[in-house]
């Protein structure tokens, strides 16, 4: 993963069943592989995922919206992501 890692809480990202969207102050390189540690908002066990940045749009004034797709998720990780995604308010 090139040593690049983000540590995030589930309440600062939009969690999807196979990835995340998040706002960042600096752009992230598209197609960069990286690790993400997600802390569920309910205080559950941290989930570590590896993924690829598939989109990064924005500017230095408003920030960047980054989309990331996770790779090689276990069934357990998929279920945890689904629960996090379902727990987000609409």
Image: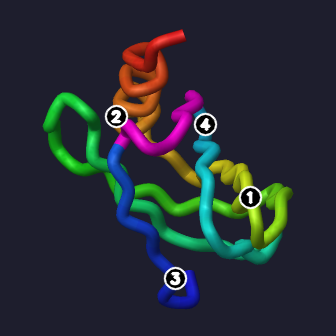
Q: Which residues are magenta?
A: 10-17
Q: Earlier in the sequence, mark 3 or mark 4?
A: 3
Location of residue 52 in the rendering, given as x and y in whole percent from the top left corner = 69, 63
Residue labelled with disc 3 = 4
Q: Report how far apart the C-alphas of labels 4 and 1 lie in the structure.
A: 26 Å
Q: Rate crowding at label 3 as few (under 14), some (14 to 19) or many (20 or more) other CA atoms within 10 Å.
A: few
Q: Name the image quarter holding residue 87.
A: top left
Residue ID at (44%, 44%): 12
Viewer-proximal residue, 84 or 88? 88
Q: Rate crowding at label 1 as few (under 14), some (14 to 19) or many (20 or more) other CA atoms within 10 Å.
A: few
Residue ID at (39%, 27%): 84
Left or right relative to 1: residue 56:
right
Residue labelled with disc 1 = 62
Q: Secondary structure at mark 4?
A: loop
Q: Earlier in the sequence, mark 2 or mark 3?
A: 3
Q: Earlier in the sequence, mark 3 or mark 1?
A: 3
Residue ID at (80%, 57%): 54
Q: Secondary structure at mark 1?
A: loop
Q: Rate crowding at label 2 as few (under 14), some (14 to 19) or many (20 or more) other CA atoms within 10 Å.
A: few
Viewer-proximal residue, 10 or 51? 10
């Amino acid at each position: 993963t090139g040593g690049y890692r983000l540590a995030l809480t589930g309440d600062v990202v939009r969690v999807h069943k196979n990835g995340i969207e998040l706002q960042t102050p600096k752009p992230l390189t598209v197609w960069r592989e990286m690790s993400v540690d997600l802390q569920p908002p309910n205080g559950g066990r941290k989930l570590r995922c590896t993924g690829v940045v598939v989109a990064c749009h924005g500017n230095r004034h408003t920030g960047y919206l980054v989309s990331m797709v996770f790779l090689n998720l276990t069934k357990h990780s998929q279920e945890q992501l689904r629960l996090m995604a379902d727990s987000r308010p609409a």
